[in-house]
Image: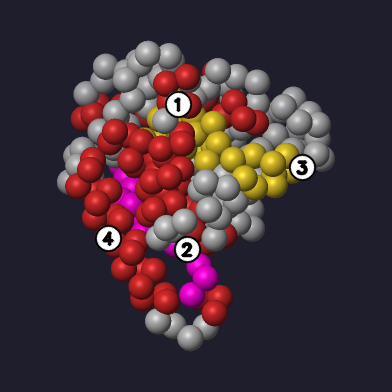
């Protein structure tokens, strides 16, 4: 069932096995470019139509980049003690706040992950495509925004199911560009309100926190501390062993 909680470690174990299978299959091909590609399977994603329903507002067509080189991890700065069955309603509230009070054209995050490990499609445009988000000032291009539903300041427990799902999502989205989740990548700042002048190329983590690109406390100290684990797990899901 789409809105059910994903099993944490079991799901990740299955994804690792699947990723290894993909790599073994790729290694048997004769085309060298195919053999070099590190990919991961697409994790289950709940479509935005399931949680948004008739609350959708009119909006302009989605914008796209040529590829996804990095992901930025956020938190939504909303309460943590929710029942996962209530997440669709919570997401509608986030959407309404961003498109209403902030007057954005859509929810800014490309994906939202809840504490049970369920991944939700955020911004419109297609989960398989490099949709330009509105999540990190100056670095919305060639990136995907993944928001953890909740507030993860210092001392707040971060569920393993949540970080496992973020890792699976990051591994999959970075695969087409063959980006190692543990690496740093060059991203060009489009806005001087970021940490970098407009036009400057910044070497940022391929799995970055919001605060790597913008002056903010997001994604919270507790979730920031889990980013090294997320990077390592994402790399394993891509079949990287070194």
Residue at which label 2 appears: 38
Q: Which one is closest to the eye, mark 4 or mark 3?
A: 4
Task: Identify the residue at horizontal 37%, vertical 22% (top origin).
Answer: 150
Locate residue 230 relative to residue 129 in the image: left or right: left
Task: Identify the residue at horizontal 24%, vertical 51% (top origin).
Answer: 13
Mark 2 → mark 3, Cα distance in angstroms = 25 Å
Look at the image and say whether residue 40 sits in the magenta stretch.
yes
Residue at which label 1 appears: 225
Q: Earlier in the sequence, mark 2 or mark 3?
A: 2
Task: Identify the residue at horizontal 27%, vertical 60% (top origin).
Answer: 17
Q: Which residues are magenta?
A: 35-54
- What is the secondary structure assignment of the residue under circle 2? loop
- Whether residue 231 is visible here, answered yes or no, is yes
Q: Earlier in the sequence, mark 4 or mark 3?
A: 4
Q: Which mark is residue 101?
A: none
Give the percent coordinates (x, y) of residue 44: 30, 50
- Whether residue 58 is visible here, answered yes or no, is no
Q: Which of 82/93 is in front? A: 82
Locate residue 118 relative to residue 192 in the image: left or right: left
Relative height, residue 152 to residue 122 (above, below) = above
Q: Which mark is residue 201?
A: 3
Mark 1 → mark 3, Cα distance in angstroms = 25 Å
- Residue 81 lies in what quarter of the image? top left
- Residue 22 lies in what quarter of the image? bottom left
């Amino acid at each position: 069932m789409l809105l059910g909680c994903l099993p944490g470690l079991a799901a990740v174990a299955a994804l690792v096995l699947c990723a290894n299978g993909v790599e073994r299959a790729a290694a048997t091909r004769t085309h060298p470019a195919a053999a070099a590609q590190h990919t991961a399977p697409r994790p289950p994603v709940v479509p935005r139509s399931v949680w948004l329903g008739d609350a959708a507002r009119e909006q302009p067509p989605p914008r796209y980049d040529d590829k996804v080189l990095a992901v930025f991890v956020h938190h939504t700065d909303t309460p943590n003690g929710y029942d996962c069955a209530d997440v669709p309603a919570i997401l509608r509230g986030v959407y309404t706040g961003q498109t209403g009070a902030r007057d954005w054209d859509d929810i800014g995050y490309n994906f939202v992950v809840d504490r049970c490990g369920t991944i939700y499609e955020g911004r419109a445009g297609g989960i398989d495509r490099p949709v330009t988000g509105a999540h990190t000032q100056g670095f919305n291009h060639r990136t995907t925004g993944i928001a953890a539903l909740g507030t993860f300041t210092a001392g707040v427990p971060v569920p393993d199911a949540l970080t496992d799902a973020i890792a699976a999502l990051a591994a999959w989205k970075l695969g087409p560009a063959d980006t190692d989740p543990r690496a740093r990548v060059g991203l060009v700042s489009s806005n001087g309100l970021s940490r970098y002048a407009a036009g400057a190329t910044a070497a940022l983590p391929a799995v970055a926190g919001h605060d790597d690109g913008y002056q903010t406390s997001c994604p919270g100290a507790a979730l920031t501390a889990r980013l090294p684990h997320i990077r390592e797990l994402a790399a394993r899901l891509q079949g990287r062993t070194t």
